[in-house]
Image (spheres, rainbow, N blue to C red):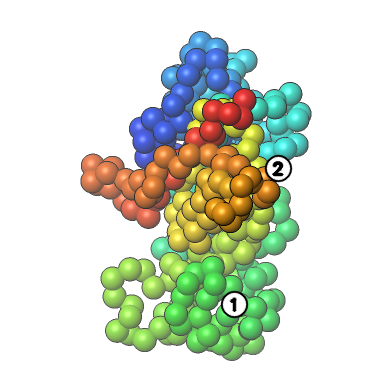
Amino acid sequence: MISFSHVPVMLEECMRGLALKDGGVYFDGTVGGGGHSFEILVRTSPNGRLIATDLDDNAIAAAKARLSPFAGRFTIRKSNYKEYERVLEETGTDKLDGVLLDFGVSSFQLDEESRGFSYMKNAPLDMRMDPEASLTAETVVNEYPEQALCRIIREYGEEPFAKKIAANIAAERKKGRIRETGQLVSVIERSIPAKFRHGAPFSRKTFQAIRIEVNDELGGMEEAVRGLTLRLKGGGRICILTFHSLEDRIVKNVFRDLETDCICDKNLPVCVCGRKKEIEIITKKPLTASEEELRKNPRSKSAKLRIAERVETYN
């Protein structure tokens, strides 16, 4: 098995946010190397149970090995967290005491050159979180129409030079197929004015955009966040780690909607909308990594943690 290394981001903040208890049933939507899951099982001993999902075979193998001391208390399925309904049904689970969703790409995936996630190393243009998926970054870069590329880079990467980057990609691929990350970085570099290339890595936004498209990271996210939140028992907590503004905006809007109570005209004698407050938002503003964690794990810099609790009337 390939060594899988992943430092769990904002570990203590997530564990406190989940308000863990012995005997609880918890769902970890992206098990990664098992860092968060391990602590959930430790802190819910001896009877806590964990259900986890991931799309990466190496991550699943590493997590199973790491969680082996808790045999019988956890189940890991190769699945997208968005398929939670099927996974929970297969495991005979109705309500949950806690949900953890970590939308970050693991250090292992970024560092493993063959995966093509990183703009720092030359590698095949892949970017698939599930190696068995059909769509790759190479397909997106070489076969998507220029207008579609521009839209993806602009919307998913929030890249102000999206139009120029897409145009240069379209021109470059006419010379020959773009197969490696280094080729793409070169195209991006000459698309961005020199004065804007300093500071943050200039390829980051475009690589993020293509990765989101390849893995359909935003598709179905809103529905899954809402559905998993409503699967909580009264007093149950959901903790969500996001790593860019598009994800965070989705989570914020879902939480805000679920926290909204009756929207009827206040002059009406009784409620006719039937709307009821489903959650209490614990983090009015998202939590971020501490200075100490930032020193130890710079990749936690963009992390934001939002926490909500199911109101007690829903048991």
Residue 190 in percent (x, y) is at 43, 85
Residue 269, horizontal then vertical, whole percent: 61, 47
Disc 2 residue type (three-letter): Glu
Q: Residues within 10 Å of mark 2 (few under 14, many from 20)?
A: few
Q: Amino acid at mark 1?
A: Arg
- Identify the image quadrant of the C terminus: top right
195, above or below 183, in the image: below
Separation of marks 2 and 1 at Cα, in angstroms: 27 Å
Q: In this view of the protein, which residue sits in the foreground, 307 or 60? A: 307
Residue 178: x, y in percent?
59, 75
Q: Secondary structure at mark 1?
A: helix
Crowding at dot 1, Cα within 10 Å, few <14 / some 14-19 / many 20+, comes out as some
Residue 62, horizontal then vertical, whole percent? 54, 32
Pick the residue in front: 128 or 282.
Answer: 282
Residue 26 is at least partly visible in this image: no
Q: Earlier in the sequence, mark 2 or mark 1?
A: 2
The residue under the point 41% across, 30% down is 15
Task: Compare residues 46 and 128 and report the one nearer the observer.
Answer: 46
Does any portion of residue 210 appear in the rendered image?
yes
- Residue at (60, 42) in percent of width and height: 276
Residue on which the image places disc 1: 151
Q: Check residue 285 in the rendering and tell me which mark sits there, or answer none.
A: none
Residue at 59% x, 77% y is 151
Task: Kindly identify which numbered label has been placed on residue 83.
Answer: 2
